[in-house]
Image (spheres, rainbow, N blue to C red):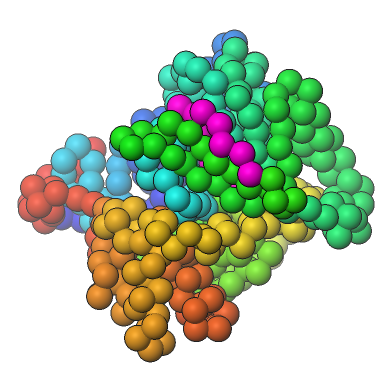
């Protein structure tokens, strides 16, 4: 059994909620499905519950501002279905979801994918040991449960998320054993013109970043220009080793290591749909090819938010609003001319919101070891425990692509469906074959794009639609 709606939105983060608000304002029948238990997405997770609490003060103004968007979304009249997983998308457009153990098909006039971003995979020796996790995962625990690590933690990586979580951890009473900054030397001086432009257009954002950096350097051991990291231990992390650009190498005791090397757009749904994708060299990642309204090469399928290219919460909201205006126009709820007029000031605000990106992308572009670990014994595919060396061995048999490597090694066949090894395999093959990463490409995505049980699949078409 299938349902039909004017607009199906996947993801109740900044982009999805903002699009729903605009679409409902123009009288559309809107259904928003999301895997989480409450709206807000990753960046505003649990915001309506904690925005007015002491935790809200710790997380900061950029976080608590999301409460207003959540409030307007709840009042918009859009139907909202949490705890719902989308496990396949098809042309039509059509989506297949599970909720409460029941699988349902949803047909839509338009589909808006607002699935956000994921942390960039960071393979290095020992990264699969218990006690090694991402900064984003640690921040989720803080937002959802107001919990912090019990003892001193090491943070390694670069980018705004690593800095802001470190500051939030200190504000919460946590301890940091050391911050290993992996930003390569010379990044600021080589991007001075971009820095000047970002400062001119978004001075508050740059000031916040500088204040985070200054606070950390005052309060915790701050090691610059780290080029290599290794987690050491038998059954869990016990020590870590790091090397700096100057050749300094140190080993330190560690019980918890948090890593972060930026985020990349979530593109599994658009890959599954066969949408055209482009390589964003500034962000070292693929993103769906979109028109100025956020529509993909697949008719009536739109993408908004960080899934369209990393831009942050404000940009995500604005991209969601722009997409919703075009969707309303396509459905005949507003004229093309009125949509264009309404979108004009939003586009101007979006341009300002994205102003710092050129500088941030250049400053925090990952170091080469993120893509190609120097130790080939490092695991490339966590799910199937396939090492970089095994990928290189396959590359030595010819010029295989990711799908051939997948067939011969099972890399990318685990529960994450390649989300954690897609880029690693592509970069390893590209380096071995002397080809650009965009020419190598990524795995072919096959259904289901998220795991589901046979019991759930058996309910599809039985009439037991989720509420």
Residue at image location 33% in from the left, 37% down from the top: 234
Quadrant in which the N terminus appears = bottom left
In this picture, which residue range is highlighted in magenta? 249-261
Q: Nearer the viewer, residue 218 or 456?
A: 218
Q: Position of residue 8 (x, y in %)?
A: 39, 53
Would you say the magenta stretch is mainly helix, strand or loop? strand
Q: Is residue 199 left or right of residue 161?
A: right
Q: Position of residue 79 (x, y in %)?
A: 38, 39
Picture layout, residue 296 above or below residue 20: below
Q: Quadrant of residue 269?
A: bottom left
Residue at image location 57% in from the left, 80% down from the top: 436
Q: Position of residue 304 (x, y in %)?
A: 55, 55
Q: Quadrant of residue 167?
A: top right
Residue at image location 23% in from the left, 52% down from the top: 451
Picture layout, residue 273 above or below residue 124: below
Residue 411 in the magenta stretch? The answer is: no
Q: Residue furthest bottom?
A: 398
| Residue 34 visible to an observer of this rendering | yes
Tally of numbered discs? 0
Q: Quadrant of residue 216?
A: top right
Picture layout, residue 137 above or below residue 463: above
| Residue 12 visible to an observer of this rendering | no
Quadrant in which the C terminus appears = top left
Q: Position of residue 63 (x, y in %)?
A: 62, 29
Residue at image location 34% in from the left, 53% down from the top: 382
Q: Nearer the viewer, residue 178 or 462?
A: 178
């Amino acid at each position: 059994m299938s349902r039909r709606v004017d607009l199906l939105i996947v993801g109740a983060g900044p982009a999805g909620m903002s699009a729903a608000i605009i679409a409902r304002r123009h009288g559309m029948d809107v259904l928003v499905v999301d895997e989480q238990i409450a709206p807000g997405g990753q960046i505003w997770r649990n915001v309506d519950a904690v925005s007015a609490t002491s935790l809200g003060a710790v997380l900061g103004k950029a976080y608590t501002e999301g409460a207003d968007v959540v409030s307007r979304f709840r009042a918009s009249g859009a139907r909202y279905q949490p705890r719902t997983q989308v496990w396949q998308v098809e042309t039509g457009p059509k989506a297949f979801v599970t909720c409460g153990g029941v699988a349902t098909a949803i047909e839509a006039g338009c589909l808006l994918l607002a699935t956000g971003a994921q942390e960039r995979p960071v393979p290095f020796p020992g990264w699969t040991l218990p006690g090694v996790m991402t900064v984003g995962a640690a921040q989720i625990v803080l937002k959802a449960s107001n919990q912090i690590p019990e003892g001193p933690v090491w943070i390694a990586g670069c980018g705004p998320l690593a800095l802001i979580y470190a500051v939030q951890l200190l504000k919460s009473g946590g301890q940091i054993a050391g911050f290993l900054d992996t930003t390569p030397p010379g990044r600021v001086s080589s991007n001075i013109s971009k820095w000047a432009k970002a400062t001119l257009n978004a001075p508050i954002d740059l000031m916040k970043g500088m204040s985070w950096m200054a606070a950390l350097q005052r309060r915790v051991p701050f090691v610059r220009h780290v080029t290599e990291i290794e987690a050491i231990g038998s059954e869990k992390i016990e020590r870590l080793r790091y090397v700096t650009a100057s050749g300094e190498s140190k080993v330190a005791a560690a019980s918890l290591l948090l890593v972060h090397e930026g985020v990349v757009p979530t593109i599994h749904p658009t890959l599954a749909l066969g949408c055209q994708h482009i390589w964003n060299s500034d962000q070292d990642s693929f993103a769906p090819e979109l028109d100025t309204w956020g529509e993909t090469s697949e008719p009536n399928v739109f993408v908004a938010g960080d899934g369209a290219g990393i831009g942050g919460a404000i940009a995500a909201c604005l991209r969601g609003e722009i997409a919703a205006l075009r969707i309303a126009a396509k459905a005949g709820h507003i004229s093309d001319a009125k949509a264009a007029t309404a979108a004009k000031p939003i586009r101007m605000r979006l341009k300002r919101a994205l102003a710092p990106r050129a500088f941030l992308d250049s400053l925090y572009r990952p170091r080469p070891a993120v893509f190609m670990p120097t130790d080939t014994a490092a695991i490339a595919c966590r799910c199937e425990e396939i090492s970089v060396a095994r990928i290189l061995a396959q590359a030595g048999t010819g010029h295989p692509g990711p799908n051939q490597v997948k067939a011969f090694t099972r890399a990318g066949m685990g529960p994450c469906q390649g989300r954690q090894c897609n880029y690693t395999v592509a970069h390893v093959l590209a380096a071995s074959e002397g080809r650009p990463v965009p020419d190598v490409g990524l795995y072919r995505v096959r259904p289901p794009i998220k795991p589901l049980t046979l019991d759930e699949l058996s309910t599809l078409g039985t009439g037991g639609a989720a509420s």
